[in-house]
Each structure stands twice: as C-alpha cells, then as structure tokens.
Image (cartoon, rainbow, N blue to C red):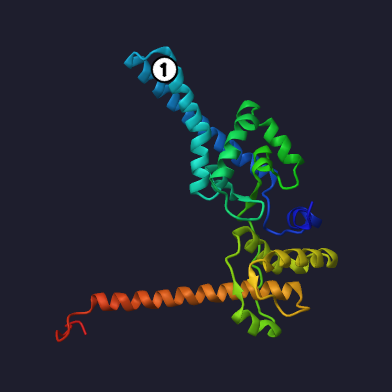
Amino acid sequence: MSAIEDEIVIGEGVAISVAEAPITMRMLSGLIDAIVVLLGFYVASLIVSATALLSGFDPALTRAFNIATFVLWLVLVPTVVEVLTRGRSLGKLALGIRIVRDDGGPVGFRHALGRALVGLLEIYMSFGTIAATTAVMSSRGKRMGDIVVGTYPMRTRGAKSTMPPLVVHPALEEWSRTADILRLPDGLALTARTFVGRAGSLTPQSRDRLGRDIAGRVAEYVSPNPPAGTHPEYFLQAVLAARRDREYALLTASSKRYDAEMERVGALPFGIEDPER
C-alpha cells in the first residue's frame, strides 16, 4: 500500500479533502443509484410486457425483450451515464463523489462497462453485501468492480477551509516561466494542491514522504526537471502556480479576442456614423 493511499486519505486523522470518499457516502450514493436503476428497469419491464401482450408476441420473443431490457437498464445505462459524466451518476452527484482511475484520470468506457458488469453480481444479485464488504476491507473504499478495472471513488467536495494561496519560491521563478508542463490528471492536480495547502498539519515524517511521492508523480508531466536539490513542496507550488497563471493568461487573451470580434461585428460600415456615439 503506498503512502498516498495511507496518508492522504486516512493517515493520522488529517483532514485532507481528497482521495477516496468515506464508505458511508459510497454506500448512500450506491443506494440512490440502485433505486433509480431498479425503478427504471421496473417501468421499462412493464412497458415491454404490456406491449408484448397487446401485440400478441410469442413467449420466447417476449423473454428476449425482457432480457434486452435487463441488459439495457442494469448494464448499458449505468455505463453510458458514467462515461458521459466522467465518473458520476445521480447518487454520486448528490453526495459529491466521482469515480476516477487509480492514477487520478477520468474513467473510460472500459472502466464503466467493467464496473457495471461486476455490479450485477456484487450489488444486485447479492443485495449489495459483496460490494459493501469489499469496500470496507479495501484501503480506498473500492468495491469489487473498482478492483477489477482499476478505479476508486474520489470525493470532489467537502473541504471545510480555504487553502493558502500558491506562491512560487524565488529560486524557481525563472524555471516556472519556461518549464513545459503537460496537463495533469484531475485527481493528481487536486491531490497536489490539497497537500500543498494542508502540509503544515502533517507530521514531519509524513510530510516529507508524501511530498516526495507526489512530486515524483507530478514530475512525469514536467520538463525539464527543476534545479537539483529543489524541495518537493517548492516544486509542487511552482508547478501549480505556473498552471494557474498560464490558464489565466489564456482565458484573458481569449476574452480580449472575443471582445474585439464583437466590436468588429457590431461596427457599422466605413463612412456611416453611429448615432449612439
């Protein structure tokens, strides 16, 4: 089990608002999703049965339609919803949870389909007992489907305090302006930002261990490496601040271009005076 799993999530009672969601939130969101899916399946089954009865379908054809309805509502619908919402569903949205890959990235079709297929056994066929037992025993609150496809539930809201602003260390100012920084996975960026903001509440040993671990993961998306001997926390602050400043500059430039285009679109032809000016 890595330091990230031990410390960021449950280590030493520190309130770092990141990583996996508590098991209670996970179970409640799963209950909401199961109720919605089963209600949809029940309504769809009634419609299929009524249509088959009125149309005089053969019993074998009716059973085939019922099986298709079962697959649609218990497998395909959850899969499509999870893919389109990037790891969310009605229950997860209500509880502030998102399903992400183990590396913090968004889930894809393979992950969502695998979770839905395994969910037939661990949620619906076992009335949720297998999923609950596996989640309690897992370090990241994973159910069996998460273990199979490599995902976990991440809490996306719930922080109780505002984190301090990001400040670039003077020794890294020049490096941060020229470094090539790729897009960080959402989960990794959130983990790094939360660690930097809450590092002071960790014990020195955990702070050093986590800082090195997170900095090593972030360094995979940065080139060139920072100067030798750079403190991990200074490195993380510089990367996060550079991302913030660059995104702000892009948004500002885009806003200026939009304003200029709108001014050109609204301008009258040359030589015609605008009575409102």
Residue 98 vertical position relative to residue 59 in the rendered view, above or below = below
Residue occupying image coordinates x 76% and y 63%? 213
Q: Nearer the viewer, residue 85 or 166?
A: 85
Relative placement, left or right, of 196 versus 35 is right
Residue 62 spot, x, y in % from top left? 42, 17
Residue 32 vertical position relative to residue 99 in the rendered view, above or below = above
Q: Nearer the viewer, residue 228 or 4?
A: 228
Residue 57 spot, x, y in % from top left? 36, 15
Using the rendered view, name the quadrant where residue 254 is placed: bottom left
Residue type for callout 1: Leu
Residue 264 spot, x, y in % from top left? 27, 78
Relative placement, left or right, of 12 versus 93 is right
Residue with the mark numbered 1: 61
Residue 87 vertical position relative to residue 63 in the rendered view, above or below = below
Residue occupying image coordinates x 57% and y 73%? 244
Q: Quadrant of the C terminus?
A: bottom left
Residue 219 vertical position relative to residue 98 in the rendered view, above or below = below
Residue occupying image coordinates x 79% and y 57%? 3
Relative placement, left or right, of 66 versus 2 is left
